Image: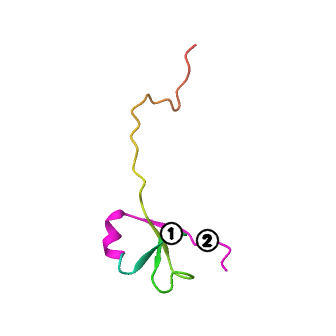
Amino acid sequence: MRTVKRPRRYLPRQLKPLLTPLFRYSAARDAYVLRLVGRSTGPVLRFDRRRPQRFEGVERRNSQSVA
């Protein structure tokens, strides 16, 4: 049994329909693995669910306090 997890590679969501015939979803890994051999070899893919967040507050980095 593998002791080191294979690294996850993040892909854009737009590629999901193209890769579905080659990859299957593994609930244990919460990722997509290569069909037939993905249990032990091959890439482990996740589709990027992160969204860029906009910050609407005041910029406080590198600011100096005025006392």
Q: Secondary structure at mark 2?
A: loop
Q: Which mark is residue 27?
A: 1
In percent of width and height, residue 52 lies at 40, 48
Nearer the observer: mark 1 or 2; the answer is 1
At which x and y percent is residue 12? 37, 63
Q: Amino acid at mark 2?
A: Lys
Q: Which mark is residue 2?
A: none
Q: Residue at x 53, y 31 (%)?
A: 62
Q: Using the numbered discs, state the Cα–Cα distance from disc 1 to disc 2 in whole angstroms.
A: 15 Å
Q: Nearer the viewer, residue 18 or 56?
A: 18
Closer-to-camera residue (36/50): 36
In this rendering, the answer to whether 48 lies above or below 2 is: above
Which sits earlier in the primary sequence, circle 1 or circle 2? 2
Which residue, as the protein is rendered here, is positioned at the far top?
67
Q: State which region is magenta.
A: 1-19
Q: Which residue is mark 2?
A: 5
Would you say 56 lies left or right of 62 here? left
Picture quadrant where residue 10 is located: bottom left
Q: Position of residue 18 (x, y in %)?
A: 31, 75
Q: Amino acid at mark 1?
A: Ala
Question: Which structural element holds mark 1?
Answer: loop
* 36 within the magenta span: no
Q: Residues within 10 Å of mark 1 (few under 14, many from 20)?
A: few
Q: Is residue 6 left or right of residue 50?
A: right
| Residue at 58 percent of width and 72 percent of height | 6
